[in-house]
Image (spheres, rainbow, N blue to C red):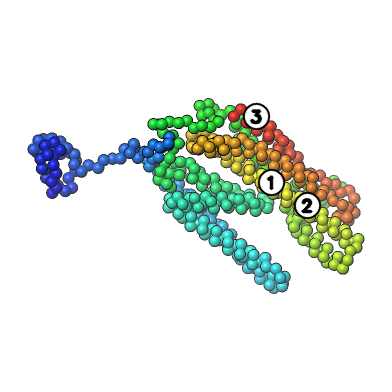
Amino acid sequence: MVEILCPHCEGEIELDDDASGEFACPLCDGEFEWNIEEEESFDDAVTHTDNRIITTDFNEMPAVPKVAGIAFCIYMGLVIILGLGGIILGLALSSAESAYGSGTSFGLVFVIISLVVIGFAMVGMAFGFKTAKGEYIGLIGITCISGLMFLLSVFGYEDAGDIPSILIALAFTIGNLCCLFVPILKAQFTGVLVSSSGPRTPKKMVNEFDKSKPIHPLEWAGHGVSLVMLIMVIICLSSSSWYSISLDDEDFLTMGLSEVELDYGFGFGLGETVTYSELVEDEEDFYDARCVDGSSAQCDDIKQSLDYWKSWKTSTLILKIILIITLVVAIVGVISRVAAILANTGLMNLPDNGYKINDMIRKFSPIVSSVLLFVGVLIFMIFQPGVGPDEVWGGDEGLDGSFGAIVWIALIFSLLTPILSKFEIDVS
C-alpha cells in the first residue's frame, strides 16, 4: 500500500502499489488521477530553432538502412571475389615469369594490387554492416567508399566493358548521397528529422526557382540535353571508329581510343584487335632486334613506323583523358538536375547557399561539357597522324584515311548544346 495526500482536502488516502487511473477521495469526494503516464505530444517532440524543425516524430522505414547496408556488402563481396581472382592470376603470371626467366615482376605487382583491393573491400563491408544496423557513421563510410570506387572506375576506364562497373559505382554513390541529404532518409540513421522551415516561423527558401509556377519547358529541355550529353560522352568513350584507313575503298584499319582493328582481309572479316601499347612494344622490339649495331634505310623505316604508332597512342590518350573529365562533369550536371527537380517538387530541402551552387552547376555544366568535348575532338583531329608516311605501309598506294562518324557527331553536338543552354539560362 502507498499513502498519498488528496489534492483537494489534503487528507491521507491509501492506494495499492500498482493502482493507477482516476479515483474519488473518500473524505471529500473530490476526483483525482494517480500513476497515469502522460503521452508525449507532437509539440513535445519538436524543437523550433533558426527557422528549422528538429523532431523525433517521423515515419520509420527500417528497410532503408538494411537495404543500403546489405546491398553495399554484396557489392564489396563481388569486389573481394575479383580481388581473389587477381591474386590467382598474379601468382600464375609470377610463376610463368620465373619459368621463362623474364626478370620482370608483373605477377607480384598484380598480387599486391589485388591484396590492397581486398583490404579496401573488407573495410567497405565492415561499414556496410554498420549501415545495416542503422549506424550513421557506417553510412558516411560507405558513401565515401562508393564515391572513391566511382572515381577509380572513371579514371581507370579502358573500353565499353568498364561501363557497367562505372554505372554500379555511380548508383551506390547517388543512393548513399540521398541517404545523407534527403531529410526523411537521413532520419532513419540519426533518429532526428530536420526540416528547413516550420509552421511557427515560416521562411521561404531563397533561390531562383519559383515553386508557385511550373518549370519552363526549356528547363525540361535542358534536363534532356544534360542526359543526352552524358550518353554522348559514354558513346564517345566506347566508340571504336574514330578514324579509319582504307585501301582501294576497303577498310584496312579502324582506330579506337585504346585499340586498333586490323582487317588483314581488307574487309572480308579476317580481323584482329590489338592495343596501341602492344603495337608500340612490337615495333620497339623489332627496332631493337634489327638496329642494334647501327642505322640503315630499313632502320629508318622501322623508326618511322614506331613514331607513327606512338603518335596514335599519344593522340588517343589525350582524347580519352579529356573525355573522362567530360564524363565526370556530365555526371555531376545530371546529379545537380535531379537535385533541382527533387527540391523544386518539395521532396528534398537544400540550404540556400547549396541551392544556389546547385543551380549554377545545373545551368553551366552542359556548356562546360560541350566545350571540353569540342576541345578534345579538335585536339585529336590536329594531333592524329592520319595515314602516316608511305614507309609505314611498305609503299602501298591507294591508302586513304578518314574520320569516323563519331567525330562529326561529337563536334556538331558540342556546338549545338551551348545554344540550347543559353536559351535555358535566359528563361530560368
Label 2 belongs to which residue?
A: 312
Q: Are marks 3 and 1 in contact (CB under 8 Å)?
A: no
- Vertical comparison of 390 with 333: above or below: below
Quadrant location, the C terminus: top right
Q: What's the residue at 45%, 46% (across, down)?
A: 64
Label 3 belongs to which residue?
A: 423
The mark nearer the N terminus, 2 or 1, is: 2
Type of residue at label 2? Trp
The reply to whether residue 267 is in sight is: no
The location of residue 223, given as percent across then percent down, is 60, 35
| Distance CA(mark 3)–CA(mark 1) | 25 Å
| Helix, strand or loop at mark 2 | helix
Please identify the quarter of the rendering in which residue 217 is found.
top right
- Vertical comparison of 330 with 91: above or below: above
Q: Is residue 204 left or right of residue 98?
A: left
Picture mark count: 3
| Helix, strand or loop at mark 1 | helix
Type of residue at label 3? Phe
Q: What's the residue at 85%, 51% (across, down)?
A: 388
Q: Nearer the viewer, residue 85 or 376?
A: 376
The reply to whether residue 367 is in sight is: yes
The location of residue 246, given as percent across then percent down, is 83, 48
Q: Nearer the viewer, residue 98 or 372?
A: 372
Rate crowding at label 1 as few (under 14), some (14 to 19) or many (20 or more) other CA atoms within 10 Å. Answer: many
Q: Residue furthest front?
A: 50
Q: Nearer the viewer, residue 180 or 91?
A: 180
Please identify the quarter of the rendering in which residue 35 is found.
top left
The location of residue 251, given as percent across then percent down, is 81, 48
Label 1 belongs to which residue?
A: 323
Rate crowding at label 3 as few (under 14), some (14 to 19) or many (20 or more) other CA atoms within 10 Å. Answer: some
Q: Residue furthest left?
A: 27
| Helix, strand or loop at mark 3 | helix
